[in-house]
Amino acid sequence: MTMPADGSLPADLINRQIRLAARPFGLPKPTDWDVVEEPVSEPVDGRLLVEVSHISLDPAMRGWMNDVRSYIPPVRLGEVMRAGAVGRVIASRHSDFAVGEHVYGQFGVQEYADSDGRALRRVDPAAAPLSTYLGALGITGLTAYFGLFDVGDPQPGQTVLVSGAAGAVGSVVGQLARLKGCRTVGIAGGPDKCRLLVEEFGFDAAIDYKSEDVKTALRKHCPDGVDVYFDNVGGEILDAALTRLARGARVVICGAISQYNNTEQGPGPANYLSLLVNRASMTGMVVFDYADRYAEASAELAGWLADGRLRSREDVVEGDVTAFPQTLLRLFSGANTGKLILRIR
Amino acid sequence: MTMPADGSLPADLINRQIRLAARPFGLPKPTDWDVVEEPVSEPVDGRLLVEVSHISLDPAMRGWMNDVRSYIPPVRLGEVMRAGAVGRVIASRHSDFAVGEHVYGQFGVQEYADSDGRALRRVDPAAAPLSTYLGALGITGLTAYFGLFDVGDPQPGQTVLVSGAAGAVGSVVGQLARLKGCRTVGIAGGPDKCRLLVEEFGFDAAIDYKSEDVKTALRKHCPDGVDVYFDNVGGEILDAALTRLARGARVVICGAISQYNNTEQGPGPANYLSLLVNRASMTGMVVFDYADRYAEASAELAGWLADGRLRSREDVVEGDVTAFPQTLLRLFSGANTGKLILRIR
């Protein structure tokens, strides 16, 4: 957008939004959202206006569309689809934010977002590409950081197994585990992703769940058992991982992408009694609980990223907000590697 | 047994033993064990002979009969069935144990046990009935103690839910939780057990899973959710309890009596993602890991028992060792309340 020289907004500025229209049954369909256009207004006192440039696409979004009690309320019908995003301040009557600054916030799937400034994080496009603030330097990286270090508590020399290992969170988990001195084994679908795990993210071994028997492969690649299993997928892979736990193992339940589009409840982890046999634990984590430590963790992640020990891979799709529904489906078809982002043209 | 006046053993003393004859498929059958008789010999140097009087019958025994990797090796075919038991020393060439002393040990399902004295605990029939050393003052009480306090970590005012609540471990868990100042809710089968929970063990509420919808009852009796769920049963009750977890809840996996006789693997807890939503954990525990703290815990349990704040209920079946197979089945039919013990006539 080109701003008028006087700093005011163009009079005819239109905000295209993706609003939730229906509760999906199974995989979301494009008709589960409406495209709505509304005029953009100047922010009122104490508020600012953000032009959204990068939208985070997350498996968790599927859960937010269901009308069930969860760790945050569902998106209401008619509401702009919830999404973390990065954008640039284009108008401000907020004392903390100036026009031209870049910010991260829960801006939703829309082109412009009006904000009261609360829960915004300033991001620096000179320090890292803006997309990285949705990847390793964003909630994705923080999820990996707190899930692995705080819940998983891996010790040097231990074996850390990660599912969805070529995905946004999984690829960071594997790298952080390696930084900690662990043996890292990733599970992903297909030879390309598995190659990526080893060659780009430094995993010690990769298991292709589409072509290998996961239990057999776990016996081979985790000969001393699994000390930390970081689960992003649930389903059969979780159940297979449970068969290979080491004594005192920690299972981190971060997500369950294989389950989110189920039209009826899938079976639970039948091998859960492995927790008893191995005195192991299985613990759910939600990154938002660690908000008071984001700054500390972000600084550490930024340091590793700067010195090359951590790589952030972003799968950036260019489009306008109407590309959101089809782009989101890439997460569930296994098409993406790394962090899936919709970059608004 | 009447001992000869000179302290030697009668020459014709016969030891009847229950030895594992077959790996059960489903519920054990009497033919899964053999009754074997063998002469009793005087103990050699450094060993002692125990006349077994009380045998502990535990759900875990069913697991020990399977040829699978678990927290202890399976009982081998032809081996005396493993069992904790209490008995009296009737001959000793061991410096630490004198004839006439009472001891607890893994004596197995047999009338006489020869022992090297390792892992024996001396018990005092003047302080409590011998059966109680298999109940609240035995491994049962220790399981409840460490499972609840160390793994469950209940805080005053929190809600503690227990399944198998009229059973050996469950009935102690409920009482310990109450001592800690928790609201205690027990799940058991049938009105008699449920009455017992409230009237004898002091539970705040009891849920009869045979006549009530457990999920509905949990909403009623645990209005603020469940902070600690102590699971002895697994299956549908575990799955129902998962729907009612409070934020940060701890699920203690102590056993899964509903699953032990399955002939194929039962379904896992389908609601396990409640762990994620509620940032909860599910942790397996095996009491043997706490052996170095048995003395401390036993002293505390004995104190509560002595001052009447803790009740130990034992379901004592009188018989000889050949009554073992049929008596064991009482555990799986739900016939017993409290600690099931076979008292050898």
Image (cartoon, coloured by chain):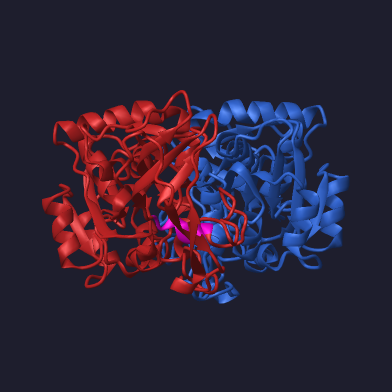
Chain colours: A blue, B red
B62 lies left or right of B184: right
B7 lies left or right of A29: left
- In this rendering, the count of numbered labels is 0
Q: Which residues are magenta?
A: B58-64
The residue lying toward the viewer, choosing from A266 and A105, is A266
Characterize the magenta stretch by its predominant secondary structure.
Answer: helix
Above/below status of B321 relative to B72: below
Q: Residue furthest top?
A: B95
The residue lying toward the viewer, choosing from A181 and A339, is A181
**Residue placed at 21% from the left, 49% from the top?**
B313
Horizontal and vertical percent for residue A332?
66, 66
Query: Which quadrant, please, contains the C terminus of chain A?
Result: bottom right
The image quadrant of residue A327 is bottom right
Above/below status of A26 relative to A212: below
Horizontal and vertical percent for residue A299?
65, 26
Q: Is residue B263 visible?
A: yes
Above/below status of A143 relative to A307: below
B88 lies left or right of A284: left
**Residue placed at 20% from the left, 68% from the top?**
B190
Q: Residue furthest left?
A: B199
Horizontal and vertical percent for residue B345?
28, 55
Horizontal and vertical percent for residue B20?
53, 63
Queried whether the magenta region covers residue A3, the answer comes back as no
Above/below status of A297 relative to A151: above
Queried whether the magenta region covers residue B59, the answer comes back as yes
The residue lying toward the viewer, choosing from A249 and B101, is B101
Q: Is residue A14 visible?
A: no
